[in-house]
Image: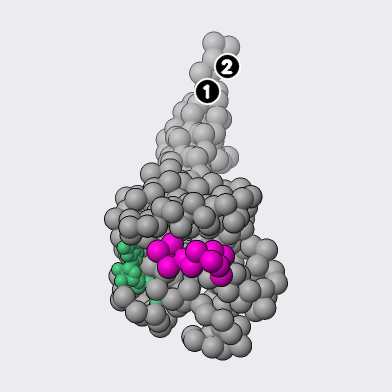
């Protein structure tokens, strides 16, 4: 089970600008004295926890991150421009370690926490600082201090944004295996899944999100039946639920029976969990006769938005993903 997202990056703060060697030259001021300004400070690399980031996905493509150098000082004691800082957004929950020393730089817990991971180099002093009573014509200035380069490891303990719930055999593991890299066991019998699986779902429309596939819920799950409470507890930390229903198994005389079993378990385990935003998804729409069942179900829950998909064939899954993303952004 891999619940950790990891990335290695190299950060480099900006070099300080060099100090300037210059002498005041004006028509009526002979031998005006040194007036070289200081170099600007190099930009810092700042790490910032963000509530919008959910994974370390960005760093697969962007591994080397640099802040800007400070500009050199100029005549007339003008200080060089400061190099721009680079703010790197990471998900809250990321632990940042210096790879060379093994030291933990920071454990980012809540959004908006920041940390200067590498400070920009100081700017060099201009030559006007070096004028003394005995040394009136300093023809030198200080170079800027170089920036720092650090190799960092970012580790994020993944917390599921979306929980996938449903009766055993509804096709939860099939769905997660099709839309993420997770490779859970899939079987044509109940209780194939014995431990939760997490998968990161990447889409073209927004920030990736983390989906949790949990073992099927059955009546009495809140008291430990089936695989019980430990998995209900697992989905307590998600922000929304996707309730998967095997539409080929719907009993025409009790259309909502299966759906109600799962919801009852949620309420009994934790009433707050039943209030969580939930998307209803009818799966296995490819099975002959499923369309009629889907219609019956829709009529029985007229107010709810119901999706029909085939996890196996991929029918309807893109539309579902786009709705999940919308709901995550709304909440
Ligand atoms: N025809 C059809 N079969 C599907 C579809 N999705 C899943 N199945 C089949 O349904 C069975 C159960 O799938 P799983 O993904 O293991 O179901 P699960 O909900 O994870 O089951 P548990 O882990 O036991 O709770 C497998 O035989 C799948 O091949 C679908 O869209 N269409
Ligand atoms: Mg499963």
Q: CA distance from mark 2 to mark 1?
A: 8 Å
Taking the spot 55% from the left edge, 25% from the top edge, the residue there is 76
Q: Which residue is mark 1?
A: 24
Q: Residue furthest right?
A: 271
In the image, what residue occupies the spot 46% across and 57% down?
Answer: 293
Q: How is the image coloured?
A: one colour
Total numbered labels = 2
Q: Residues within 10 Å of mark 2 (few under 14, many from 20)?
A: few
Residue at point 65%, 79% (across, down): 269
Query: Where is 27 relative to 153, above or below?
Result: above
Residue 34 in the image, given as x and y percentages of width and height: 52, 30
Q: Position of residue 62 (x, y in %)?
A: 35, 50
Q: Is residue 327 above or below residue 101?
A: above
- Residue 30 location, quadrant: top right
**Quadrant assignment for the N terminus:** bottom left
- Say if mark 2 contacts mark 1, CB within 8 Å: yes
The answer to whether residue 255 is magenta is yes
Extreme-top residue of the structure:
27
Magenta range: 246-257
Tell me what residue is drawn at x 31 percent, y 75 percent.
188
Q: In this orientation, does residue 74 appear?
A: yes
């Amino acid at each position: 089970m891999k619940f950790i997202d990891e990335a290695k990056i190299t950060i480099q703060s900006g070099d300080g600008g060099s100090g300037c060697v210059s002498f005041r030259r004006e028509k009526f001021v002979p031998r005006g004295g040194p007036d070289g300004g200081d170099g600007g400070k190099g930009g810092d690399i700042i790490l910032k926890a963000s509530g919008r980031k959910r994974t370390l996905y960005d760093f697969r493509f962007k591994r080397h991150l640099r802040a800007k150098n400070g500009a050199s000082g100029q005549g007339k004691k003008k200080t060089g421009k400061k190099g721009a800082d680079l703010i790197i957004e990471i998900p809250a929950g990321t632990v940042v370690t210096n790879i060379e020393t093994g030291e933990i730089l920071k454990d980012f817990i809540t959004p908006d926490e920041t940390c200067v991971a590498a400070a920009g180099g100081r700017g060099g002093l201009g030559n006007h600082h070096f004028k003394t009573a005995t040394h009136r014509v300093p023809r030198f200035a200080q170079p800027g201090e170089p920036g720092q380069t650090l190799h960092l490891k970012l580790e994020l303990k993944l917390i599921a944004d979306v929980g996938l719930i449903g009766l055993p055999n509804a096709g939860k593991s099939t769905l997660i295996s099709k839309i993420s890299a997770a490779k859970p066991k899939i079987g044509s019998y109940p209780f194939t899944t014995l431990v939760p699986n997490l998968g990161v779902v990447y889409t073209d429309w927004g920030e990736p999100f983390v989906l949790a596939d949990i073992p099927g819920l059955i009546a009495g799950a809140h008291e430990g039946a089936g695989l019980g409470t430990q998995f209900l507890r697992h989905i307590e930390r998600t922000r929304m639920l996707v309730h998967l229903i095997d539409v080929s198994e719907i009993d025409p005389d009790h259309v909502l029976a299966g759906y109600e079993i799962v919801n009852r378990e949620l309420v009994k385990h934790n009433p707050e969990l039943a209030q969580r935003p939930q998307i209803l998804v009818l799966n296995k729409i490819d099975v002959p006769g499923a369309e009629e069942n889907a219609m019956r179900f829709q009529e029985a829950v007229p107010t709810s938005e119901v999706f029909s998909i085939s996890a196996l064939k991929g029918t309807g899954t893109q539309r579902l993903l786009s709705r999940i993303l919308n709901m995550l952004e709304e909440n």
